[in-house]
Image (spheres, grey):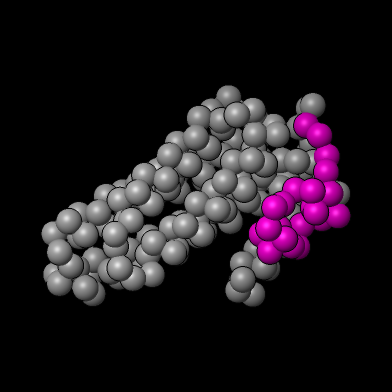
Amino acid sequence: MTTFVLSVLVSLATSFIAGDACNDVPSMTWGDACLNPETLRNGPDTAEVTVYARIAARLAKLKYESTIAAMDQTLAGGGSSLPGGEREAVGQCKDLYVGARGRMAGVADQLSGCDFTRARQDYLDAVSGITSCQSRLRSFKGSLPAMVAADLDLTMVAYDLGALIVGR
């Protein structure tokens, strides 16, 4: 993880803890909050689950932005040499990622406001978008499939944390 992302996580965790707690949301340790210790390594020792869910949602959004940039580079740099099906698949993935990024940003905002009315569907839509992109890139050569697979893992961590609050 880059130093920038780690500093963002520390900053986010600190600001979330200072905020008001949401009603009826359990607390947990950071070790319990994450399947992959790298994802939330700088989270607080114990906090309301929404803290971890927000951190994961915001980190997913940042990762999506990085992957979108890589897709833009692929389309601009090698786009003309890509076979038509691959160019179309990358373009469709980019659209799916833009949607997923908006959904995860929405989730983070909703969790910040203790408003969980749309969060469950937004999580599901983000998972669906990244999963659909992964299917489109199955035969694609290059680094994009690995990036999408890593993004899907992070998306599932975010979804699983959110499910503790909003259900599946």
* Magenta extent: 25-45
Residue 107 lies, with reference to residue 13, above or below; the image says above
Q: Position of residue 81 (x, y in %)?
A: 15, 72
Residue 22 lies, with reference to residue 102, above or below; the image says above
Q: Main secondary structure of the magenta part?
A: loop
Work out which residue is located at the far front of the displayed protein and give it: 139
Q: Position of residue 31 (x, y in %)?
A: 80, 54
Q: Position of residue 39 (x, y in %)?
A: 66, 59
Residue at 54% in and 48% down: 155
Q: Is residue 92 left or right of residue 133?
A: left
Q: How many marks?
A: 0
Q: Does 42 lie within the magenta span?
A: yes
- Is residue 23 visible in the rendered structure shown here? yes
Q: Is residue 68 left or right of residue 80?
A: right
Residue nearest the observer in this picture, 54 or 165: 165
Residue at 53% in and 37% down: 123
Q: Is residue 60 left or right of residue 54?
A: left
Q: Is residue 95 left or right of residue 35?
A: left
In the figure, residue 66 lies in which quadrant?
bottom left
Residue at 43% in and 39% down: 128
Residue at 29% in and 62% down: 140
Q: Position of residue 156 (x, y in %)?
A: 57, 46
- Is residue 16 visible in the rendered structure shown here? no
Residue 161 lies, with reference to residue 117, above or below; the image says below
In the figure, residue 148 lies in which quadrant?
bottom left
Residue nearest the observer in this picture, 31 or 68: 31
